[in-house]
Image (tube, grey):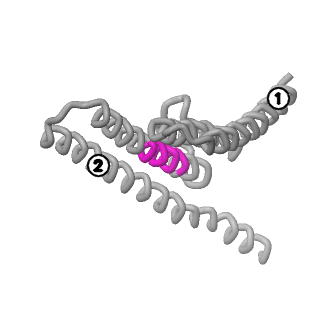
Amino acid sequence: MIMTIIRNLLSSTRHLIIIAVAGTFISALALLVYGSISVVQQILATIEYGTVSSKGAKTLALGFIENADLFLVATALYIMSLGLYELFIDNSVSLPDWLVIHNLDDLKSKLIGVIVVVMAVVFLGHVVKWHGETEILYLGGAIGVVVAGLTYFTGQKQKKKYEENH
């Protein structure tokens, strides 16, 4: 009887993950709204000043790249929210096949993909602002090392999964 109570108690605690689901969902929503407002403000400011120049184009492009970064982080948070909900609360949510998550490794793989893209966008933002400093090599190298590590990690997981299935 005690074991049944403990088992039921532990089983129901999985619903505590709804706190993380709500937090990541609200964070994603906030970033999406903020990014959308920022894009509209950028466009309106460009129209208001009405000057067309290469410096203005770089500034506009950099602003859009920074907003793309916001949208990508929002996407990562949204995927995390959906994945946690699907894993812990209800796996019958109607999602596209590419977003179906069966275990934490699936969620990690999806997040790693978004993280790599975010790092690439961040680096692109630095490249647009670049004025010939050599420090950009260190940033690019560091990002390359992280991407290589994440790629190796993901590859090992996929290799292990392939070996288990064959």
Name the foreground residue: 24 vs 130. Answer: 130
Q: Are marks 1 and 2 in contact (CB under 8 Å)?
A: no
Regarding mark 1 in the picture, which secondary structure is present there?
Answer: helix
The circle drawn on residue 100 is none
Instruction: Name which residue lies at 78% across and 35% down.
Output: 152
Q: Is residue 129 left or right of residue 20?
A: left
Three-letter code, disc 1: Lys
Q: Position of residue 92 (x, y in %)?
A: 52, 42
Q: Is residue 80 left or right of residue 165?
A: left
Q: Position of residue 19 (x, y in %)?
A: 52, 65
Q: Nearer the viewer, mark 1 or mark 2?
A: 2
Give the mark nearest the N terminus, 1 or 2: 2
- Determine crowd level at label 2: few under 14, some 14-19, many 20+ residues with C-alpha closer than 10 A: some
Q: Which residue is mark 2?
A: 38
Marks 1 and 2 sit apart, C-alpha to C-alpha, by 42 Å
Instruction: Name which residue lies at 57% across and 66% down.
Output: 16
Q: Position of residue 166 (x, y in %)?
A: 86, 22
Q: Which residue is mark 1?
A: 159
Q: Residue furthest bottom?
A: 2
Q: How many marks?
A: 2
Q: Is residue 128 left or right of residue 138?
A: left
Three-letter code, disc 2: Ser
Q: Position of residue 127 (x, y in %)?
A: 51, 36
Instruction: Name which residue lies at 49% across and 39% down.
Output: 131
Residue 114 visible (yes or no): no
Q: Main secondary structure of the magenta part?
A: helix
Which region is colored magenta? 69-80
